[in-house]
């Protein structure tokens, strides 16, 4: 059987291992960290994940959808909290029953690793750092990072502190090693490889609301949102009755208004009074003394394939800001699309990797841009009347034309329509809406003019 070497045992790497285990391929996965199933604390971003249709479809293909969905909390709407801390508005995500699922990142990762390991042809190599790709030999360069004992046994030499590099040969190499991908970095000198990296001006800090007498402190089946113009707070429920709470704000806002204990408590109490009461002064103080605001990066690159046997996937290909909840879903769809592409090309790896890159790059760039746009929506637009009117209009049109008029958010979240096609459909909708408004304005103007003409004597004409 063919062999595949996967860089990274995160969400996308672990799901790819499940896909290729099903295909019967020989799978080796190399991960810099220790096995997270044995770790008390896992470093890295832990913003709660919102599982939607694209991610569900990928999980369904490997038999994990039902189990994973049942481990999460369904969210049916946004609950927008006003600044008074007492009133709010509810904005359903889509049609009745349509929802996203709040999922714990670590648990999901652990489940997929365990699922993949059930296959005897899958091997995970933890504490193995992927360093680069050997261009000429088309091999993955890996180095074991587990430290040998520095205390020599009597009569032997001291163990070397450096491990030799391992050159991994495989028919297919999948780079799923994250936004700061070592594989992608080693490809940067290749001519015509386009790459862009943008840090946005906003960072984030994560907090927690604990269970209240073993009950949810807030309504659990909604996405809690506190939009405040240029900064925002969100909260998503967990199965253990807690909430993961994240504040997003410009770094200048953190420095100006949240750099001291007094300032940060005053800031939360003024802007998020209901959340402030549940978070508690002690937790807010301890969190901001312990952690600094973390950066958010958007990465694009093209192509996504090289050497007829290497593919960049997930954040290694298209890291995005988390404001559309599509980072994981897009990465999972990468796995599904590539699996489908392999089948379409009768497992011809060379043709499949080229075809995958050709079809996926544009979609990846599109969702990166949409994720950036959606932050404007979350932190500000949701409170504007124009946004609310458009949302109502889209809902009515979807009821009348359920197949041809689907709201933007629903196309992204509740379908597998390619992201690039989603934008084209949205443009057509905008054009139709613009025409309708122009026509309505013209009709209204004509009506007013005719009324004035009919009553011209009254107006002295």
Image (tube, grey):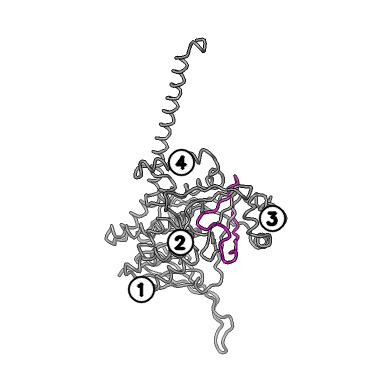
Asked whether residue 219 is drawn in magenta, I would say yes
> Of tags 1 and 2, which is closer to the observer?
1
- Real-space CA distance between mark 3 and mark 2, rounded to the nearest whole angstrom: 43 Å
- Real-space CA distance between mark 4 and mark 3, rounded to the nearest whole angstrom: 37 Å
- Look at 51% across and 64% down and name the residue there: 239
Q: Which of the pair 414/312 is nearer the observer?
A: 414
Q: In the displayed image of the protein, which residue is found farthest to the left?
A: 346
Q: Magenta part of the protein: which range?
A: 203-230
Q: Secondary structure at mark 3?
A: helix
Q: Earlier in the sequence, mark 4 or mark 3?
A: 3
- Real-space CA distance between mark 1 and mark 2, rounded to the nearest whole angstrom: 24 Å
Rate crowding at label 2 as few (under 14), some (14 to 19) or many (20 or more) other CA atoms within 10 Å.
Answer: many
Quarter of the figure with residue 429: top left
**Is the residue 324 above or below the residue 441 in the image?**
below
Rate crowding at label 1 as few (under 14), some (14 to 19) or many (20 or more) other CA atoms within 10 Å.
Answer: some
Q: Earlier in the sequence, mark 1 or mark 4?
A: 1
Rate crowding at label 3 as few (under 14), some (14 to 19) or many (20 or more) other CA atoms within 10 Å.
Answer: some
- Real-space CA distance between mark 1 and mark 4, rounded to the nearest whole angstrom: 52 Å
Q: Earlier in the sequence, mark 4 or mark 2?
A: 2
Q: Secondary structure at mark 1?
A: loop
Q: How many marks?
A: 4
For label 4, the residue is 392
For label 3, the residue is 265
Which numbered circle lies on residue 183?
2
Contact, CB < 8 Å: mark 1 with mark 3?
Answer: no
């Amino acid at each position: 059987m063919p062999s595949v070497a996967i860089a990274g045992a995160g969400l996308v790497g672990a799901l790819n291992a499940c896909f290729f285990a099903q295909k019967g391929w020989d799978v080796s996965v190399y991960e810099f960290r220790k096995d997270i199933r044995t770790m008390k604390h896992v470093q890295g971003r832990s913003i709660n994940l919102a599982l939607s249709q694209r991610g569900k479809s990928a999980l369904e293909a490997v038999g994990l959808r039902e189990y994973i969905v049942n481990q999460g909390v369904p969210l049916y709407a946004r609950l927008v909290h006003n600044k008074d801390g007492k009133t709010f508005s509810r904005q359903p995500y889509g049609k009745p029953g349509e929802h996203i699922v709040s999922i714990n990142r670590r648990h999901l990762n652990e489940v997929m690793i365990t699922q993949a390991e059930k296959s005897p042809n899958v091997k995970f190599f933890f504490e193995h750092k992927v360093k680069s790709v050997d261009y000429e030999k088309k091999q993955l360069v890996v180095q074991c990072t587990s430290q040998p004992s520095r205390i020599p046994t009597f009569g032997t030499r001291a163990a070397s502190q450096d491990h030799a590099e391992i050159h991994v040969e495989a028919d297919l190499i999948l780079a799923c090693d994250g936004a700061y991908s070592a594989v992608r970095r080693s490809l940067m000198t290749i001519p015509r490889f386009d790459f862009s990296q943008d840090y946005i001006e906003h960072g984030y800090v994560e907090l927690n609301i604990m269970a209240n007498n073993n009950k949810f402190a807030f309504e659990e089946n909604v996405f809690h949102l506190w939009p405040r113009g240029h900064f925002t707070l969100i909260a998503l429920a967990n199965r253990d009755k807690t909430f993961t709470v994240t504040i997003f704000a410009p770094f200048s806002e953190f420095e100006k208004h949240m750099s001291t204990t007094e300032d940060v408590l005053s800031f939360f109490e003024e802007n998020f009074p209901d959340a402030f009461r549940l978070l508690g002064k002690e937790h807010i103080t301890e969190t901001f003394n312990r952690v600094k605001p973390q950066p958010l990066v958007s990465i694009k690159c093209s192509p996504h394939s090289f050497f007829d046997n290497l593919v960049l996937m997930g954040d290694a290909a298209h890291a995005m800001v988390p404001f559309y909840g599509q980072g994981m879903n897009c990465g999972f769809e990468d796995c599904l699309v590539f699996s489908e592409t392999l089948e379409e090309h009768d497992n011809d790896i060379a043709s499949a990797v080229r075809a995958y890159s050709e079809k996926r790059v544009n979609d990846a760039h599109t969702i990166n841009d949409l994720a950036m746009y959606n932050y404007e929506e979350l932190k500000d637009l949701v409170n504007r009347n124009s946004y609310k009117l458009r949302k109502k209009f889209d809902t009515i049109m979807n009821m009348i034309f359920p197949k041809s008029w689907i709201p933007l958010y629903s196309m992204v979240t509740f379908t597998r329509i390619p992201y690039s096609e989603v934008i084209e459909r949205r443009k057509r909708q905008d054009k139709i809406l613009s025409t309708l408004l122009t026509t309505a304005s013209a009709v209204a103007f004509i009506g007013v003019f005719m009324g004035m003409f009919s009553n011209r004597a009254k107006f002295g004409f």
